[in-house]
Image: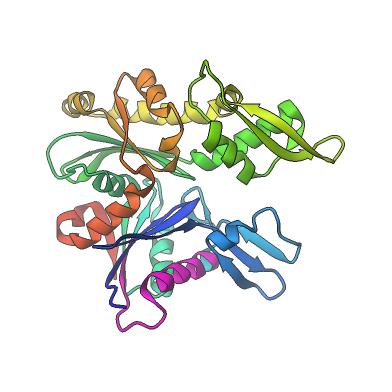
Amino acid sequence: MWLKRLGIDLGTANTLVFVPKRGIIINEPTVVAISIADNRILAVGTEAKEMLGRTPETIIAQQPMKDGVIADYRVTEAMLRYFINKAAGRIRLLRPEVMISVPGGITSTERRAVVDAAQSAGARAAYVIKETIAAAIGAGIDIGTASGNLVVDLGGGTTDVSVISLGGIVVSTSVRVAGSKMDVAIADYIRKKHGLAIGEQTAEEVKIRIGSALPVEKEEKLEIRGRDVIQGLPRTIQVFTNEVVEAIQDQLTEIIGAVRHVLQETPPELSSDIIDKGMVLTGGTALLRNLDRLLAQSTGVPAYVADEPVLCVAKGTGVALEHLDTYKLSMISTR
């Protein structure tokens, strides 16, 4: 295949691969299954996620990205190789150029690790772009104008908040609180309140199906199964929407604090632009019901969820890669 360029949204929860003119061609969980005996990688992506919480002691299923950065370099390199090979084919004449999104709060060492992993996995050149810049481009925002745009990218591992003007970030912050921490909080809440131990996948299902950022009058309910903490036997309970709201209060408060911090640091001229335009929410956690209303109520700035928020960062990496000269100020390049 003649794939010259790939945009990769290397997320804590999911990895998406974007190919210019073809769109998103891969959307799989960022999970790897490893055999302990010979340290061999058994499965990557969807197949590996199905093993989470279900493996024998000889196999580990893990997420090699933690809070948006590489926690296990070797496993991340193998995973990137898998995604690049799946997108470009194992037999290819050209090694592709790769653009990878990273959280705003990433250190230079962590950024270097991402670039090295991509090049070791088969990329001819690797470029790194901050997630909020990629998210803004993917959401269709013209970031090159002298006008302020507030982007809140809510992923699996991090929430990145940035004010963008003239193609660059004016003010930003990144907190390592997002969808994954919410899942853990829901699991902890159900354990304490109902005495039921559940896995993070079940907690994620609760969040997606009945979760909300604000209390609701007409609650939804979901039947879930887990292990009784006291008796150690399987048990089934019902969970309600407002219980989920209560469970994730701390995480929502941190996200609101990050948005407020950025707004307080924003220059007055750009603040007026943001009041006019509102903030744009991207990333999978932006789909949490009523999160836009909560942020609007807490900050006084209108909030809108972007079209296809899960795909914004991946689309943005692809567009930036196609127009490297236009967006070169917004990224770090390494050959």
Q: Residue 164: which quarter of the image?
A: top left
Please report the residue visible at 28 percent of the width from the left and 77 percent of the height from the top: 2
Question: x%, y% of residue 124?
Answer: 32, 75
- Quadrant of image for the C terminus: bottom left
Residue occupying the point 31% across, 40% down: 307
Which residue is at 35% across, 22% downward? 296
Q: Does the magenta stretch include residue 309?
A: no
Pick the residue in front: 128 or 195.
Answer: 195
Q: Indicate yes or no whether the magenta region holds residue 81.
A: yes
Say which quadrant the N terminus sits in.
Answer: bottom left
Query: Height in image: 37 above or below 228?
Result: below
Horizontal and vertical percent position of residue 37: 72, 73
Name, please, the residue furthest toward the top: 217
Image coords of residue 157 (percent x, y): 49, 45
**Where are the magenta residues, as a range?**
75-99
Q: Residue furthest left?
A: 146
Vertical position of residue 217 compared to residue 324: above or below: above
Lateral position of residue 263 relative to residue 190, left or right: left
